[in-house]
Image (cartoon, rainbow, N blue to C red):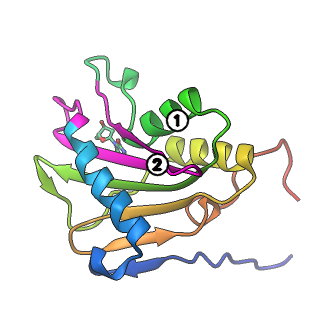
Amino acid sequence: MAEVSFNIHYEEFSSVKEMDPIDQNLIAAALDARKGSYSPYSHFQVGAALLLADGTIVKGANQENIAYPSGLCAERSAMFAAGANYPDTPMLRLAIAASDHGVLCESPASPCGACRQVMAEYQKKFGQPIQIILVGSKRIRKFQKVEDLLPFIFDSLTID
Ligand code: THU
């Protein structure tokens, strides 16, 4: 028997001004993307902005449905749009910002498990880390790779 522990690393910023210009621009796009949220049931408006290797930014927003499971999170709507429209262009950074009834959350929303699994799939597809930036009004968290949000990713039928 062995005791094993994971060390998960992320950076925490108290203002967007502390971040590099690429992140600042991507965060502005994620905040703007909330305008596309269709969330009449939760009133939780989530915007996502995905930076591709050629500089393209693909936006997404959560889309709800009266049959609840038929909706889709902001992150997946951005990643699937990029996957469909720019299938050969690697995904480098993903910023996510959420508002509750129109007010940006103080602490960032954390992506659901299904979105993390989809991030993992595209990270594997392109063979390079996807950075994830979770935006709140009081704090911003930046992860360097999907493993830092999803340890023990399912990416094969066995684990070593
Ligand atoms: N949602 C997202 O779009 N992304 C997240 O990271 C968390 C949750 C959406 C799904 C649903 O439309 C609403 O937020 C409330 O759960």
On whether residue 53 falls in the magenta region, the answer is yes
Give the x, y percent position of residue 140.
Answer: 34, 71
Q: Specify the amino acid type for callout 1.
A: Ala
Left or right for 22, reference 89: left
Vertical comparison of 113 with 141: above or below: above
* Residue occupying image coordinates x 63% and y 42%: 89
Q: Quadrant of residue 129?
A: bottom right
SS at circle 2: strand
**Is there a contact, CB below 8 Å, between mark 1 and mark 2?**
yes
**How many labels were placed on the picture?**
2
Q: CA distance from mark 1 to mark 2?
A: 8 Å
Read off the magenta span: 36-64
Give the x, y percent position of residue 159.
Answer: 84, 54
Q: Quadrant of residue 41?
A: top left
Q: Quadrant of residue 71?
A: top left
Find disc 2 in the rendering and name its residue: 50
Find disc 1 in the rendering and name its residue: 82
Q: Earlier in the sequence, mark 1 or mark 2?
A: 2
Give the x, y percent position of residue 107.
Answer: 27, 67
Q: Specify the amino acid type for callout 2.
A: Leu
Question: Does the image show residue 90?
Answer: yes
Q: Quadrant of ligand 1?
A: top left
